[in-house]
Amino acid sequence: MTQDPETAEISFDRSTTELDALQQAAYAVADLMTVDIRASATDYTCTLFPRRAGLDEDMLKHRIRAEVIDQTLRLRIAKETGPIRNLIFALAFSGTGLADSGTTDE
Amino acid sequence: MNVRLLRDATAVPPSGWQLLPMRFHRFDSDSVLLTNLVGEHLFVSPDQFLAVIDGTCNDQELLARLRARHLIQRPGDRLPAELLAVKLRTRLRHLPDSTGLHIFVVTLRCEHTCRYCQVSRQSSARSEFDMSQETARRALALAFQSPSPHLKFEFQGGEPLLNFSLLKWIVREAKRINRDHGKDLAFVIATNLALLDDEILRFCEEEDVHISTSLDGPADLHNRNRRRPGQNSWQKTVAGIRQVQDRLGPGRVSALMTTTEASLDRARDIIDTYVELGLRNVFLRPISPYGFALRLRGGAGYDVERWLRFYETGLDYIIDLNRGGLPTVESYAAIIARKMFSNQDPGYVDLTSPAGIGLGALVYNYDGDIYASDEGRMLAEMQDHTFRLGNVQTSSYEEILLNEKLLQPLAESFTLSAPMCHSCAFEPYCGADPVFHHATAGDFVGHKATSAFCRRNMGIFKALLRRARDDDFARDLFWRWGQR
């Protein structure tokens, strides 16, 4: 693939980075850049396409790297707290009648 | 000794806690904002945050504060989940009672030609743009099918006082119908007050009708935005406000302002105008990107960042007025403060999730068409009928509320599942606005990384939280606003 001079490239180790985190990070930085993600045996390689001319390449790399770390943390928190989150929602909505709204009278 | 024993009893050993559902936002270089499911929040340092997530934190005071905010719990604890469930349920308890606000567009006619008006440029002589009594009768029948024990009827236009005879009929007919329903009714006329006279004042006094008007600030600014023959809109509005205050009482009239480019450097002047008139609630509102307002040269003429600077200047001035002993409220901040500092969700139509369209408000247009929100009606003026749910002549209540044109935007924009919203630390304070995103991005969700709605509201949340963190007086003031 030919590298566009305006783009930057950054890689993440597949053993430490989840694809979900990369995709969510790419979504979150969409005001600054769009991101193309390609997987190899060991890495995810991200090509960063700046939205505007003049955006510094290092800044874009720092931004996506920081965002991937935060999205990884979010996934970790979500995974760890998922069961209790579901419990809280179940407790909150139990007895409201909303859970029965799909049933029909025979 | 007793304190020591208490500390030992509540101490949390390293890794001896479980995370509760939480979201975070890197607030500034040395602090991270943590929020729980219902918006209770805490600022911690980036190192503290990582230590809590990694299970290596040994700062007992911090762990105690995290437990108190229901951000962590000790293994085996049951109470935090139960309390969070009760708080969550409390926040959402308004939902089964939809729909509470019923907006009647009794005429499109208006004698003003405001620069930013979204809906009405009809000559005040053209009565074909008036709602008929038959349309109003059918709209009332639909409104009373709402399960809500509280119904608010708001009259809009155009200038609703140009169809005062129908407005009177609706108020009296609603009260007659209500003898069989026993609901709590409220009535509001959204008027520029230019046509206020003794008969209208007497009617409002007798029927307990409230007045909501538009006041953009000092005379020069207001008259520049709100044009009418004679260039005396401000004089008419101010005279009307004083008449209502004198005759009906100071609490029976409120005012809203709209921010144009000319307003941006005049936040203090605008607030002073309100204070001088004894209006203690100031709602600093940006211009809406709907309807005819889009034709304003250059759009709104300002971007989110400029508007936020205006908003923060106004907010700081209002805080200082309170500090000096003059109780004054910024209404949007007060709505958010209720979400931040209480377990209540005020159900404000533009800042709630599920979105307030249809569930919070229904709009009956002069021609009988029913819209999911006032902004949906404004879009229809530009031939975009996405949010038209039916017509009073042909649609049943069930057909309106179960219309895919309502359910689809509600489901897609729900913030607990929308992209980026579901993991956003500000989600408990925010809301879904599928009409805004449809108008500006072409779909009901929008892209949160580029959404002006998102940037504006996040800017306001951060402005409030920063002041609450750094200024004890501001924190107490916001807390009081939140309990109103």
Image (tube, rainbow, N blue to C red):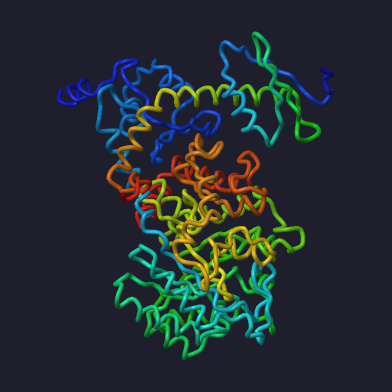
Q: Where does the image place residue B88, in percent across and percent down from the top left?
A: 35, 43
Looking at the rendering, which quadrant does residue B238 occupy? bottom right
Looking at the rendering, which quadrant does residue B194 occupy? bottom right
In front here: A42 or A31?
A42
**Quarter placement of the C terminus of chain B:** bottom left
Q: How many labels does the image show?
A: 0
In front here: B61 or B192?
B192
Image height of A22 relative to B456, above or below = above
Q: Where does the image place residue A57, in percent across and percent down from the top left?
A: 75, 24
Residue most extreme to the front:
A106
Residue most extreme to the top:
A42
Q: Where does the image place residue B422, in percent across and percent down from the top left?
A: 50, 37
Image height of A19 relative to B348, above or below = above
Residue most extreme to the bottom:
B199
At horizontal 47% and vertical 49% (from top left) the residue drawn is B354
Q: In this view, does B258 lie to the left or right of B179?
A: right
**Quarter placement of the N terminus of chain B:** top left
Residue B343 in view (yes/no): no
At horizontal 61% and vertical 23% (from top left) the residue drawn is A22
At horizontal 84% and vertical 23% (from top left) the residue drawn is A5
Residue A91 in view (yes/no): yes
Q: Where does the image place residue A61, in percent across and percent down from the top left?
A: 69, 22
At horizontal 54% and vertical 69% (from top left) the residue drawn is B391
